Image (cartoon, helix red, strand yellow):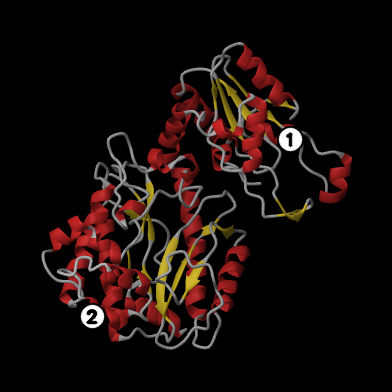
Amino acid sequence: MKLFSAKTYIDRRKQLKNTVDSGLILLLGNDEASMNYTDNHYRYRQDSSFLYYFGLNQPGLNALIDIDNDQEIIFGDEFTLDDIIWIGQQETLQSKANKVGITKVNPTAHFESTIKVAQKSGKAIHYLPPYRHDNLLKLSQWLSTPTTQIKIGASVELIKAIVKQRSIKSAEEVEQMIEAVNITKEMHVNAMKSIAAGKYEYEVVSEIYRTAKANNSYLAYPAIFSINGQTLHNHYHGEIMKEGRLVLNDSGAENAMCYSGDITRTAPVSGVFTDKQKEIYNIVLEMEESSIQSLKPGIQYRDIHLASNKLMLNRLSELGLVKGDVNEMVSLGIGGLFMPHGLGHQIGMDVHDMEDLGEQFVGYRDGLSRSTQLGLKSLRLAKELEEGFVITVEPGLYFVPDLIEKWKAERKHTDFINYEKLKEYYDFGGVRIEDDILITTSGPQVLGDRIPKTVDEVEETMRF
């Protein structure tokens, strides 16, 4: 089990205690989740906020911070001899707790009674909205509250405090993220080298998973790998790769410290881009690079998204796919036809960092509401950037026949969109290019070693 120093966790908890006014803070860990019978589990992953403050990537744990009495307690049970027979000799929970600066460890059974005593004394109970049903049921029991009211009762004060703290990545966190991105680079390079006409997609996906595991890592999210790149989250890998198609690979590693990489590259199945593919690919590359260069503290990421859309529409106008005033097209949301997702999001221990706490708290703020336009409504990060944020920049350009046909049937924006010429792209698929960026006052820092990205770099990588 890899950990930061005890001081790191002590300082994180101290900052949290100084931000939340009073009462108890409950941070629930995750338990094992069974696949098809009790002892056959899905891969275990600890809750990220629990990891951030208490560091222990082990099931069956919960933690409590008593702000008023300045106490921090981990609740869990030591392994029994029966456990050890099956899983081997284990370091004691008390020893692990000491490594993250916790001296007090109580049995699991004491957690509920501790909460109920605090409730009776009128203390505020702060907890995060549960995203797992087992934790939802536990909170319902411990707080004597109907399950339908649990998420409603989550502490906004605690959510805001954690979002504010976790959004700013420390130097040691950035180091972990660079490691995750460099493993991700190896995944992508190996995938590019494995792509070939006649292969099934899953043959390349197996190389992505193998590379992650060979680096003592897992995937941060299920791999998106498909010749049908116009399907944004395509987890189906059963197609045969054919000459003339593009293949989109959106995959990232989660390293041993549970920090994520999130990278997308698009490559030609043949190993060489056609002129038509190159035109679209270079539009997306220009969108990505210009967006990255614009990043700085204080700028709204929503504005970067819109500028990227404007650039895309200008280039599509040059190809004759759209026409008319580009500013008006941006205002009307026409860019959503070609990029129906947002430009990026925060990333850290979660690939969509802290999304379990609510996008409104993570990517938006009071006074900044979500758009209803296609594309812009899916922008996960819209608010002002701050020094220490790590974000993704992932523009894309897609041709989705069903969506185009729907807009055409509705005669939507016919003054701007050349629907007849778009038919030439119905078998094109899509292009997305993505990197992970640290926001600094001295300019944006692309994390990790350079991953093949230009047309020449991708083609050269695929030759060997």
Residue 5 horizontal side relative to residue 389, left or right: right
Name the kind of residue labelled 2 in the image. Answer: Glu
Name the residue: 57% across, 38% down. 130
Residue linked to disc 2: 420
Q: Quadrant of residue 127?
A: top right
Name the residue: 28% across, 75% down. 280
Q: Quadrant of residue 328?
A: bottom left
Q: Is residue 202 visible?
A: yes
Residue 32 at what x, y percent from top left?
70, 47
Q: 10 Å neighbourhood of mark 1: few (<14), some, or many (≥20)?
A: some
Are the residues at dot 2 and dot 1 in contact (C-beta closer than 8 Å)? no
Q: Is residue 168 visible?
A: no
Q: Secondary structure at mark 1?
A: helix
Residue 376 at what x, y percent from top left?
30, 54
Residue linked to disc 1: 93
Q: Is residue 104 above or below residue 164?
A: above
